[in-house]
Amino acid sequence: MPYPKLALKGLKKILDKSLPQEKKDLLQKHFDESIIYSQKVGNIYTGSLFLGLLSLLENSDSLKAGDKIALYSYGSGAVSEFFSVELVEGYEKQLRKNRLDLLDQRQALSVADYERIFFEEANLDESGSATMSGYEGTRLCSG
């Protein structure tokens, strides 16, 4: 998922040629829904798998409770994991259907602004949490 084209190549390789066209079309549709956020956000490395899952869940109109989703994660060093999740009743109540709108509201940062934020000293409260002042209501992105 960090690179949607790489994931698409993988999908094309594993699609069983004996599958009915309807099933192939559904798998392609779900793949397309799963890369929407990655195309907006870019490579977030380990988190890309879960960004793809979130994208699929929030952009699909055909998933339902009881459906199973296969997740495959791979990394450098020849390490990979394959596992599945099953959607439970009410999962859709946890989703945002306007996430693309929120992503489109991000503001580009200059390198100087990014570095200032990156190197800013965090002030921790008694619970160990930090509040970044001056960024309330602002969605930031680099690039």
Image: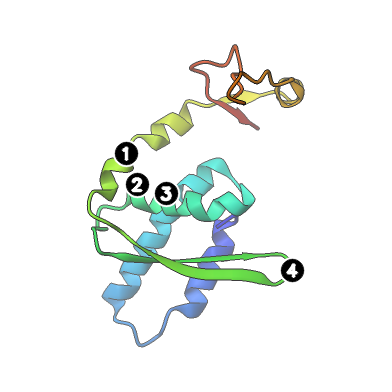
Q: Residues within 10 Å of mark 3 (few under 14, many from 20)?
A: some
SS at circle 4: loop
Tell me the quarter of the picture where residue 69 sits.
bottom left
Give the secondary structure at mark 2. helix
Q: Which residue is mark 4?
A: 77
Q: Which residue type does callout 3 highlight?
A: Leu
Kindly indicate whether the residue at mark 2 contacts the one at mark 3 (C-beta within 8 angstroms).
yes
Residue 136's tag is: none
Q: CA distance from mark 4 to mark 3?
A: 26 Å
The tag on residue 54 is 3
What's the amino acid at mark 4?
Gly
Give the residue at mark 1: 97
Q: Please report the residue visible at 28 percent of the width from the left and 64 percent of the height from the top.
A: 67
Relative side of 62 to 69, left or right = left
Residue in the image at 70% along x and 72% along y:
78
**Residue 58, numbered label:** 2
Dot 2 or dot 4: first in sequence order is 2
- N-term mark: 4 or 1: 4
- Residue 3: give x, y in percent of width and height: 59, 56
If you read the primary sequence from the N terminus, does the residue marked by circle 1 or circle 2 appear first?
2
